[in-house]
Image (cartoon, helix red, strand yellow):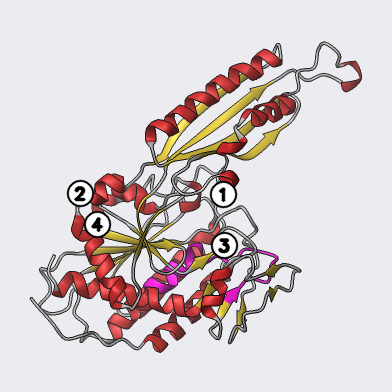
Amino acid sequence: MAESVELSIDRSALECDATERFLRYVRVPTTSDRQSPDTPSTPGQWELARHLERELRELGITDVELDECCYLIARLPASEGYESAPTIGLMAHVDTASDVSGEGVRPQVHDRYDGRPIELPAGYTIDPADYPELLEYRGQTIITSDGSTLLGGDDKAGVAEIMAAVAYLVEHPEISHGELEIIFTPDEETGLGMNRFPKEKLHSVACYTLDGQAEGLVEAECFNAYHVKVSFTGTAIHLGYARGKLVNAVSMAAAFIGLLPRSESPEATDGYYGYYCPLEIRGGLESATLDVFIRDHDDEIAKRRVAALDQFARAVEAAFPGGTVATESRKQYSNMFERVSSEPRVMQKLEAAMRATGIEPTRHAIRGGTDGSRLTEMGIPTPNVSSGQHNMHSRYEWVATPALARSAELVIQLARGWAVDGG
């Protein structure tokens, strides 16, 4: 069914609703735990998921399921006359990263930002000299944490935008759309969040994650990702009698880290260049473990780095007689590029919706991955969309409220585009 009338959206109402939701959601501590085998890995994720379940039901949506692993899937029925339009999904994750504390987030609202450095109560400064994107929002509202924690825009900005868009569609039944699936997931930050995802329950022919950074970015490429656990086994003995007997597992781990090429680290690369990243080290004299992330857009290069870690392990064993080093690798996700490219309408619809909000889309390769990377592997092409986050995983995180509104508007334009323009 064709419909040529230009869509009029009250962006100020969207901004107000998305901002209020965002401020509520970030106060719920949902830091995930890489060391936990459970899904979700932390109880706070249940708290936010149950809150979202209630909000969806309060909107009058009856098809809502929160399963035993904290995957929340809800369906907004198609508008009358659009029941045969393709179903699309909208996805965001409820957890936040463990790199900086997410406990006791106290969001700070900076109205009418004046373009000067933002001084946070905990003693940190967000300076436009370092983060010039701030100046794009001079005169607008900026949200930060107080500096003692991260903010949680990754990905509670995406959650708030989806919820605000769905609420707007419910309140404005004149806006045509097909069936929409709302999908909130746990543990994206651990790389394990989609391991138990019930993909068979989805109706979507395509899905979109709202988990990107600056406005205008559309992302259909991501890293290939591997997690390598390196285990060091030494020999412990009283330090006073250690000569010729002690094999220090902590020193072995430090020597291993020293072999990782500094030119292939996150802080030394950008664009399509991949890296090794030693993420976390634990242990003592007798045993220690090290988590290493391997990332690259080219899977063969990523595999080469995984193989190199085995060679580094042998070198450390040679340097520490009597010690042993073992590596165990697993793939976390794959580059989504080929699968998304095989369905060109998925990106065409996204870019048309972006232009309808007044922003020219910019294609960008993600230096990371999302739940969309995993869902794409499962057969549903799922590119990533900007949600207005900046400085993710840090105390310097910030979100501008106009970006929340425009991302919510993007969702509405996507929903309408898939319905009225045909699948």
Eye-nearest disc, 2 or 4:
2
> Quarter-wise, where is residue 276 in the image?
top right
Residue topped by disc 1: 33
Using a 10 Å C-alpha cutoff, classify the residue at mark 1 as few (fewer than 14 neighbours), some (14 to 19) or many (20 or more): some
Label ID, residue 202: 4
Of label 1 and label 3, which has the lower sequence position? 1
Of label 4 and label 3, which has the lower sequence position? 4
Picture mark count: 4
Residue drawn at 46 percent across, 66 percent down:
214
Residue at mark 1 to residue at mark 4: CA–CA distance: 27 Å
Rendered view: 214 above or below 195: below
One can see residue 297 in this view: yes
Which amino acid type is marked by label 4?
A: Leu
Are the two marked residues, 2 and 1, in contact with CB atoms closer than 8 angstroms?
A: no
Rendered view: 45 above or below 53: above
Using a 10 Å C-alpha cutoff, classify the residue at mark 2 as few (fewer than 14 neighbours), some (14 to 19) or many (20 or more): few
Q: Quadrant of the C terminus?
A: bottom left
Which amino acid type is marked by label 3?
A: Asn
Q: Is residue 154 left or right of residue 110?
A: left
Q: Percent position (x, y) of residue 180?
A: 25, 68
Eye-nearest disc, 2 or 1:
2
Q: Is residue 143 left or right of residue 80?
A: right
Which amino acid type is marked by label 1?
A: Asp
Using a 10 Å C-alpha cutoff, classify the residue at mark 4 as few (fewer than 14 neighbours), some (14 to 19) or many (20 or more): some
Tell me the element at label 1.
loop
Of label 2 and label 3, which has the lower sequence position? 2
Are the two marked residues, 4 and 3, in contact with CB atoms closer than 8 angstroms?
A: no
Residue topped by disc 3: 391
Residue topped by disc 2: 342
Of label 2 and label 4, which has the lower sequence position? 4
Residue at mark 1 to residue at mark 3: CA–CA distance: 21 Å
Rendered view: 228 above or below 322: below
